[in-house]
Amino acid sequence: MSQTEDRAHADVAPGDEYAHEEFGSGLRSYLIGLGLALLLTAASFWVAQTKVMWAPAIPVALLTFAIAQMGVHLVFFLHLTSGPDNTNNIMALAFGVLIVFLLFGGSVWIMHHMNTNMMAPVEGGVRMPMQQGVPLQPQPGMPMQHGGGGHH
Amino acid sequence: MSNSAAIPGSLPGVVPIRRDPNHLGHHAAGEGESHAPGRGTGGPAPKRIVVAYGFWIFLLSDIVMFAAFFAAFAVLRGGTAGGPGGAELFDITNVAVETVLLLFSSFACGVATLALNARRAFAFQAAMAVTFLLGAGFLALELREFTDLVARDAGPTRSAFLSAFFTVVGCHGLHVTAGLLWLLTMMAQVFAKGFRQDILRRVMCFSLFWHALDIVWVAVFTVVYLMGSAA
């Protein structure tokens, strides 16, 4: 019983491609992946530097391009498919993606709320040093009031 | 054995690929026990699949570790402690060159895998050499950037932002360094021992590792450099 006959049942190792094992046809998949990845990379760098786009949309566009490019890598370089012979690989990947989103999204979400809700109750813009662009040292012109957590 | 369960009334020789797509295989429609390796009476899965799947799990756990570093960077991004931020430190052109080098390196690694499967020794060694040179070029640019930052008093001890930056980018760089050593080992082993099954499995794991590093780099240049210098 060769593995070829048993496609309907057997698995494929991650990274292995089933149908294109010859040099020429396999190369095609890598070339398509390379082209798409270059395109998405160029789009990312263009979006990051352009003045044409509405600024708040830029991070969203960057994340979209990044996720798309990861998908391109997974499909054309790592040869993941939705086929039955890839079920185990996809399930493991899905679990990994779940953990990554919980870890990254959860951290950013929670810390954002900490930053906005636990700021010092002080007027005049004295903020926690976690906030961007606020120097640790008191500014000469800034009235220093010591409220709740406003010590620096 | 050949096609175990043909759909009644179908042409002889047509393989019912979609009959039981997820191998739940419990008799009802007459499919019976699977004779495929790795399931039921088929015996254990081939070692190539076991090894690659185990390495796949390792890579996913490695990516979870990177996710923790990325989360730290995203949270500490604003904590510059009065020091320089991403917009004034990062050289986006340099990052673009690094990205292209690593992408072509990943492509060359794929070509090496194809050459290996076709048992073309010279094409394999040549593609691996190209993979190495592109990867080494990436690493050289990254080291130059790091030494430049340290020289500008923007080392990892300067602020929480820079600590997080050096951790996530440096960790990726360490992976690339380890990958380059692994790459040379694979070239030597294929040269010395030929296309043995265990060597083929090692090269397969290496190529998974190298492609995964490129996927992590996509997150690095997006989250760290592009989003980090925009704010």
Image (cartoon, rainbow, N blue to C red):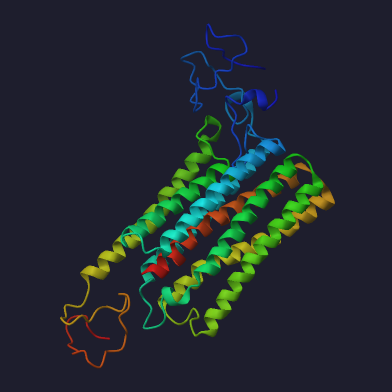
Residue at the extreme right: B192
The x and y percentages for residue B71 are 40, 63
Q: Is residue A146 above or below residue A21?
A: below
State the residue in front, B176 or B197. B176
Q: Position of residue A98 (x, y in %)?
A: 41, 48
Q: Is residue B226 left or right of residue A75?
A: left
Does any portion of residue B162 appear in the rendered image? yes
- Residue at image x 36%, y 59%? A58
Res. A78 in view: no
Q: How many numbered marks does the figure carry?
A: 0
For this view, does B214 lie left or right of residue A124? Answer: right
Q: Nearer the viewer, residue B145 or A5?
A: B145
Q: Can you tell which quarter of the image residue B14 is in?
A: top right
In this rendering, the answer to whether A77 lies above or below A140 is above
Instruction: Determine the image quadrant of residue A116.
Output: bottom left
Q: Quadrant of the C terminus of chain B?
A: bottom left
Where's residue B196, x and y in %? 79, 43
Residue at horizontal 66 percent and vertical 36 percent from the top: A25
Residue in view at x 54 percent, y 9 percent: B10
Q: Residue furthest front?
A: A52
